[in-house]
Amino acid sequence: MKPHTSEPDMIQGGSGQDGVAAMARYEKRQQARVLSKEKRKKQYRFIGWLLFAFAVLWGMGALIWSGYGALKTTAGREIAIMRLKGAIEDRNAAALQVMLRVTDETVPLNDQTLTPLFAYFDQHPEAYKMLDEEFARQSEGKQVYIKGLTSHPPVFTIHVFENRYVFEPALYFIHARVADSEATLVVNGVKVKEEETKDPFVKKIGPYLPGAYTVTAVHPDGKKKTARVELFGGARVREVDITK
């Protein structure tokens, strides 16, 4: 088995300006993750105090009870969101499997299918802020997604299922343009089954969970070409050119 090499060790193995720039980017991502974790801790404490305060007021009457119920619902939603972001940051696939709900049976939730999501957040710590903005729009009713009709769904749609909050991830398809119509496609190291389109040089693959992917076209003569695609927000169908 190939020994695991941490990202800092790999960066330190570089040289010159490239190594310094890579280390700076790594430090920036680390600082962003630390700030994100501290922010969630403060939010947990704040929500906990709010729940305690309203619990004390609970016995003052039906009106207070009604207000407490509304706050409890809101607090429960915010706690669910923080747990989602915490599970992503901790790369906790087991916790995410409980929080996520995928209605498409062809998309399993496991360590392998969730790894691209973790990779995306490692490379884009600012994505946590994007999730906050999306959840805020959903709370205000400004972003309505109708499955099958809206081409730009939220990365995660939050809703109640069996008396608890769950998150339904957007599912994406990739249209890969290849130089040879006989080429096969490998996604993140795994050969995939393609679906033909009207263009013999364009192959449809998917669906995929949000995340960072590498798509490799393997030609009959053994030559390979690879392209990177990030599936996180935006259109459900992405086009990637692997002819270059």
Image (tube, rainbow, N blue to C red):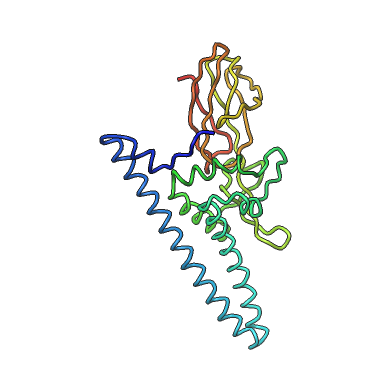
Where does residue 106 sit, x and y in percent of width and height?
A: 70, 37
Compared with 221, 100 (above or below) is: below
Residue at position x 68%, y 46% in the image: 102
Compared with 185, 98 (above or below) is: below
The residue furthest bottom is 60
In the rendered structure, the answer to whether residue 11 lies left or right of residue 124 reads left
Residue at position x 62%, y 55% in the image: 158
The residue furthest top is 221
Where does residue 137 sit, x and y in percent of width and height?
A: 53, 56
Compared with 50, 230 (above or below) is: above
Number of marks in picture: 0
Q: In the depicted view, which residue is nearer to us: 142 or 160? A: 160
Q: The C terminus lies in which quarter of the figure?
A: top left
Quadrant of the rendered image containing residue 184 = top right
Q: In the depicted view, which residue is nearer to us: 11 or 99? A: 11
Residue at position x 64%, y 44% in the image: 110
Residue at position x 54%, y 40% in the image: 116
Quadrant of the rendered image containing residue 152 = top right
The residue furthest left is 16
Q: In the depicted view, which residue is nearer to us: 80 or 20? A: 20
Where does residue 157 sit, x and y in percent of width and height?
A: 61, 52
Q: The N terminus lies in which quarter of the figure?
A: top right
Where does residue 237 sit, x and y in percent of width and height?
A: 58, 34
